[in-house]
Amino acid sequence: MEFSRIFMFNCCALLFCTALAYGQATSPPAPVAMSPTPAPAPAPAPAYVNLTSLLSVAGPFHTFLNYLESTKVIGTFQNQANNTDQGITIFVPKDSAFKGLKKPSLANLSDDQLKSLVLFHALPKFYSLADFSELSTKGPISTLAGGQYTLNITDDSGTVHLDSGWSKTKVTSAVLSTDPVAIYQVDKVLLPEAIFGTDIPPTPAPAPAPESSPAAAADSPSAESKGSDSSPESSPSTSSSQRILNLSIWNQLVLAVLAAGIVLFF
Ligand SMILES: *[C@@H]1O[C@H](CO)[C@@H](O)[C@H](O)[C@H]1NC(C)=O
Ligand SMILES: *[C@@H]1O[C@H](CO)[C@@H](O)[C@H](O)[C@H]1NC(C)=O
Ligand SMILES: *[C@@H]1O[C@H](CO)[C@@H](O)[C@H](O)[C@H]1NC(C)=O
Ligand SMILES: *[C@@H]1O[C@H](CO)[C@@H](O)[C@H](O)[C@H]1NC(C)=O
Ligand SMILES: *[C@@H]1O[C@H](CO)[C@@H](O)[C@H](O)[C@H]1NC(C)=O
């Protein structure tokens, strides 16, 4: 008897608190509740990505973009992005990577070699970061340069490592990863064995200590520098995650109110 009355009262208290919380919940975030209605479909339009304008605002990738244009490989890349089902994955070295290039210089390469070197920085297929773990098991991966121009790609718990023989580097951030176009920033220029031979320079001792945040680099690829024409996907996702955050804060508030009610009752 006693117990069931306590139980009843408890239920009433719960209902009351919930109703209270709900009543409050519906009034203040009214503008938020509106937003899901008019914008239900962040239409996955296979948007055209202008590689030139994207690369000119991201990075800085000016050196690579200059090579893309002087070798006309930009047209090949854009065509692969526009007109194929497979899409394209491009590894873009930052300007500092070209400045750091001392030993084998690009200055003495023939036009054909330079063109191959630039093509070597792309794969004829779209790969999301998550796809690389599967790619790891497949041995040398063909690049757009074809033939012997292959890259070894390994995924080390989320960090994507690239090995061209001459260059060992990794993906440091994702500039864009929306099917059919993926653009990943890398630390070094990829120097193909097919050009520079197998006389591999001694690798500098791989710094063991500062490997603290491999996951951070890959898990949260900073999509900081998107071109203006590539942003439609980013805003809905941030706002929805904000909404989730706000929801969870709200839930905690409701829980706290409930808990307080129960404690008071006893
Ligand atoms: C791509 O962007 C570049 C630079 O912003 C511009 O010059 C070019 O016309 C654009 N191409 C197309 C097809 O819109
Ligand atoms: C790619 O698509 C854009 C927009 O449809 C077009 O302007 C551009 O010429 C295309 N470029 C190539 C290389 O197909
Ligand atoms: C490039 O060529 C110049 C002259 O043709 C030569 O002196 C230089 O050593 C070459 N550099 C490399 C890296 O092969
Ligand atoms: C890539 O991996 C293969 C074995 O899967 C190996 O024979 C080859 O030497 C590697 N190439 C480079 C550039 O590391
Ligand atoms: C979530 O709350 C933050 C402040 O905590 C606010 O700036 C933001 O607009 C809210 N987002 C939504 C979707 O309500």
Image (spheres, rainbow, N blue to C red):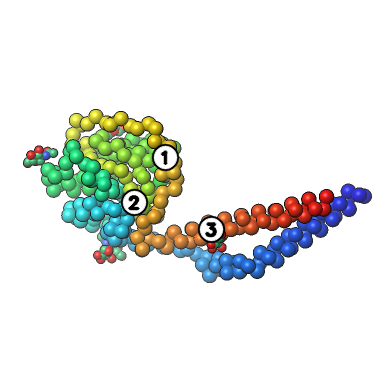
Who comes first in sequence, dot 1 or dot 3? 1
Q: Residues within 10 Å of mark 2 (few under 14, many from 20)?
A: many
Q: Residue at x 18, y 53 (%)?
A: 71
Asked whether residue 84 appears in the rendered view, the answer is no
The CA distance from mark 2 to mark 1 is 19 Å
Q: Residues within 10 Å of mark 3 (few under 14, many from 20)?
A: few
Quarter residue 155 falls in? top left
Q: Residue at x 23, y 57 (%)?
A: 75
The CA distance from mark 2 to mark 3 is 26 Å
Q: Nearer the viewer, residue 5 or 263?
A: 263
Image coords of residue 130 (percent x, y): 43, 45
Q: Residues within 10 Å of mark 1 (few under 14, many from 20)?
A: some
Is label 2 or label 3 in front?
A: 3
- Which structural element holds mark 2? strand
* Left or right: 125, with 7 as reference point: left
**The disc labelled 3 sits on which kind of residue?**
Gln
Q: Is ligand 5 closer than 8 angstroms to the Cβ of mark 3?
A: yes
Q: Say whether marks 2 and 3 touch (CB < 8 Å).
A: no
The CA distance from mark 1 to mark 3 is 26 Å
Q: Quadrant of ligand 3?
A: top left
- Which structural element holds mark 3? helix
**The disc labelled 2 sits on which kind of residue?**
Ile
Image coords of residue 106 (percent x, y): 16, 44
Who comes first in sequence, dot 2 or dot 1? 2
Q: Which residue is mark 1?
A: 214
Image coords of residue 109 (percent x, y): 13, 44
Q: Which residue is mark 3?
A: 242
- Which structural element holds mark 1? helix
Q: Which residue is mark 2?
A: 183
Who comes first in sequence, dot 2 or dot 3? 2
